[in-house]
Image (cartoon, rainbow, N blue to C red):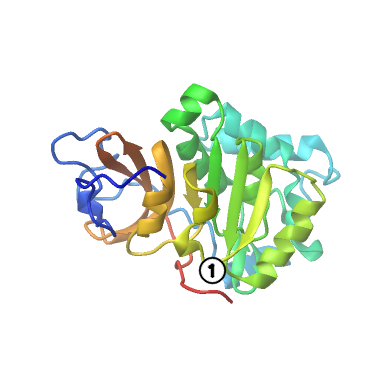
Amino acid sequence: MTARDPRAPKFPLPLERLTPANRPRVTPAAPAGSVPARAVLRPQQPLQHAAQSAARKGTPSGLGLDSEDVRRSMVERLRAGGIKSETVLAALAEVPRHRFVDPALVTQAYEDTSLPIGHGQTISKPSVVARMLELLFDGSNAKTSATLGRVLEIGTGCGYQAAVLARLSKQVYSVERLKPLHDKARGHLALLRDHRIRLVYGDGRHGHPPNAPYDSIIAAAGGDDLPAQWLEQLAPGGRLVAPMLDARAGAQVLMVVDRGDEGYVHSCHEAVLFVPLKFGLD
């Protein structure tokens, strides 16, 4: 990494300091102190609700789970729900989501619902995965290179999002702090044999310094602030998408941060409800 600019702001950066006062480059999607009037996205549905979803026994359209038609139907529902990026939709259509859920739950794999993956975690809804990737892909690097470049994912979970990211990137480094989930994701992704994915067992709050900087960073857990390491490991011209508490609105929102020549600029998007970002290994 290049030498630190003595004018660079100290970390961690509070929300109000992410946008340079003298040159705002990204306008927040909603006025300060408000959250867009949209339903809260709940990518990691409360486990009791996920269990209720798991109890349903309907099969998607009566088609075989390996059928491209099943994934295409899911993509069409996402498109109808407002996802506009055809690149992201195409990537979602390629990944067999049913391979990333427990065998007892595969009949719901292509519904827009979260499902338990063990250890108090769930696989995020396809609509939330799609929306976050759409925001990430709207960054400047993706516009010029048609890929997300080198991606850092915080929170591997079962590995599904990493598999989708690989379709959009040159390389994906995915960090997971829960060893059982790290091992589970490794087993799932081994079946795809995608050399673009590297799994890391580690504390995601520290990012992954050995392979920094990253053109894109995406997180599947949220806290009160963005860890300094994430911002430091974001390459100039890169984009970060993560859930973060917006104290002005009193809610967790999807936060987009772009690293420009003169600092970090941000925009706030949909209200969300992700699991807390935690320290350490487990």
Residue 5, image quadrant: top left
Q: How many marks?
A: 1
Q: 78 or 134, which lies in front?
A: 134
Question: Which percent across, then down, holds residue 138?
Answer: 45, 32
Q: Residue furthest front?
A: 3
Q: Taking 12 as reference, is 198 left or right?
A: right
Q: Taking 2 as reference, is 18 left or right?
A: left
Q: Secondary structure at mark 1?
A: loop
Quadrant, the C terminus: bottom right
Residue 108, image quadrant: bottom right
Mark 1: amino acid: Pro
Question: Which percent across, then down, holds residue 197?
Answer: 67, 47
Instruction: Write the residue at 37% across / 42% down.
Output: 2
Q: 212 or 249, which lies in front?
A: 212
Establish if 9 lies above or below 85: below
Instruction: Write the residue at 61% across / 55% down.
Output: 113
Q: Which residue is mark 1?
A: 46
**Residue 271 makes an appearance in the image:** no
Residue 181, image quadrant: bottom right
Q: Residue furthest left?
A: 22
Q: Taking 14 as reference, is 172 left or right?
A: right
Q: Residue furthest bottom?
A: 282
